[in-house]
Image (cartoon, helix red, strand yellow):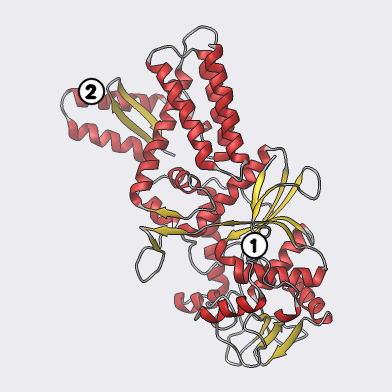
Amino acid sequence: MLLLYNTLSRKKQTFKPQKRGVVSIYACGPTVYSAPHIGNMRTYLEQDVLKRALIRLGYKVNHVVNITDVGHLVGDANLGEDKVKLAAEREHKTARQVADFYTAEFERDISQLNILKPDVMPKATEHIREMLELIGHLESKGYLYSVPTGIYYDTSRFKNYGKLSAMSFAKLNKYLKAGARVERAAGIKNITDFAVWRLRERQSIDEMIWDSAWGEGFPGWHIECSAMSMKYLGETLDIHCGGIDHIPIHHTNEIAQSEAASGKKFVNYWVHSNFLTVDGKKMAKSIGNVYTIGDLIGKGFSPMAIRYLFISAHYRKKLNFTFDSLENVAKTLRGIYSFLQRLSEIKRAGAADPKFSKKVSSAKKEFFGEVDNDLNIPGALSAMHSLISEANRRIGNDRLTASEAKKVMAAMMEFDEVLGLEFERHSKPKEDLDERIKKLIEMREAARKEKNFKGADLIRDTLRQHYRIILEDTKDGVRWHREG
Ligand SMILES: [Zn+2]
């Protein structure tokens, strides 16, 4: 049983899918005009934890993440230029080239971070027909009107327009007026109204322009998500995810479009991730604190350390990123990996102590109890660490038996079904090392004994660069682990 906080009801609810055993999840994907920053990637990591928790509970998950390769304007609302086209001008490329390049970046990021690949990643530009059909449907129901710049949705016609953000229509209007980023284009009735189809401007280039019954142009950003989510997952989705910044505009507009067209509830559970700040500040190009996953890896951090840091905060809480905190979790993760390796090397005979076995099962119960309580990963991690400490104490006293170690290892592997931190890869005994690597470690030891530290460091760097083997000099001698 999974409890999930639903933004729409503003409370934790027991999750129940429409179809037994199957869950549909839609998440707003990247706008592919630049590399996603770590705040975006935090959201996808949180969603991955949700997906893994559902899979562990036995559900088949149908997961769709769209690729916005057209239609997302700089201002998020009505005016401004298309982000992808703007990047194309900046980079002297075609919009298609820009979109393809950053789509590949996104795919590389999710694979490096061990995020389970979505079942479908539909591109907006390949679903123009579905969007036009949806627009036609909305028009026939009287929700649209046209102005010189495009076809707009009349939000005053949709009952409970602000229900997701718990804002009345008047309050939402005020909210948007307060945000300087929204200007009113000529002829627009309400400031909350938004374009479902933008007509091409006379001087605009031919790229990313489609013909339609309303004239040549391109789709609005919000219509993409409504059209693609309903195409792949049906008119009612079990779960829709995204960042909390999407609540008052983008997701509110998705609801208005989808529900007006289908007459059905669009989403049963809205799950939103909170922001990520860097050094206590909002990420901004002007401050120079916008980082990508590639930036962090370039500074020598492993993707698994990044993953660990981002999932270790609760998804509904703000996460403040600092390099110190990343350094710390990288150390913690190395400790876990070397713990797993040690476990795999335990050979001590003897039956499992019933008291210790009980500790293992209670840690498991606690871990998954926390996961099932609105994905409380901080709580789950603390249950895991208390088991690790207990096992380490027994290893220290030379009391942990091989059968106990096996139980702990099995628990750790179960934890990793949700955490996705590649525990399996790090749970091999030292003996599994390649002969060449063993030889290098021995050579380094010999160099150290001869006080040839330069030579020893050279071998250590070679092991890291070529074999991803990290050496650690402990009081029990040299230990190694593979870099995550
Ligand atoms: Zn969306």
152 lies above or below 116: below
- The answer to whether one can see residue 470 in this image is yes
Could you tell me which residue is drawn at 67 percent across and 42 percent down?
2
56 lies above or below 11: above
Mark toward the start of the polypeptide (1 vs 2)? 1
Question: Gap in Å between the C-alphas at discs 1 and 2?
Answer: 55 Å
Could you tell me which residue is drawn at 53 percent across and 58 percent down?
106
Ligand 1's quadrant:
bottom right
Q: Nearer the viewer, mark 1 or mark 2?
A: 1
- The answer to whether one can see residue 125 in this image is no
Horizontal arrangement in the rendering, residue 117 relative to residue 314 (left or right) = right
Q: In which quarter of the image is residue 96?
A: bottom right
Q: Residue 280 location, x and y as percent?
A: 37, 59
Mark number, residue 10: none
Horizontal arrangement in the rendering, residue 439 relative to residue 371 (left or right) = left
Q: Quadrant of residue 253?
A: bottom right
Q: Is the residue at mark 2 in contact range of ligand 1, meaning its CB lies under 8 Å from it?
A: no
Q: Which amino acid does label 2 sit on?
A: Ala
Q: Is the residue at mark 1 in contact range of ligand 1, meaning its CB lies under 8 Å from it?
A: yes
Q: Residue 138 location, x and y as percent?
A: 79, 77
Mark number, residue 446: 2
Q: Which amino acid does label 1 sit on?
A: Asn
Mark number, residue 66: 1
Q: Residue 327 location, x and y as percent?
A: 35, 44
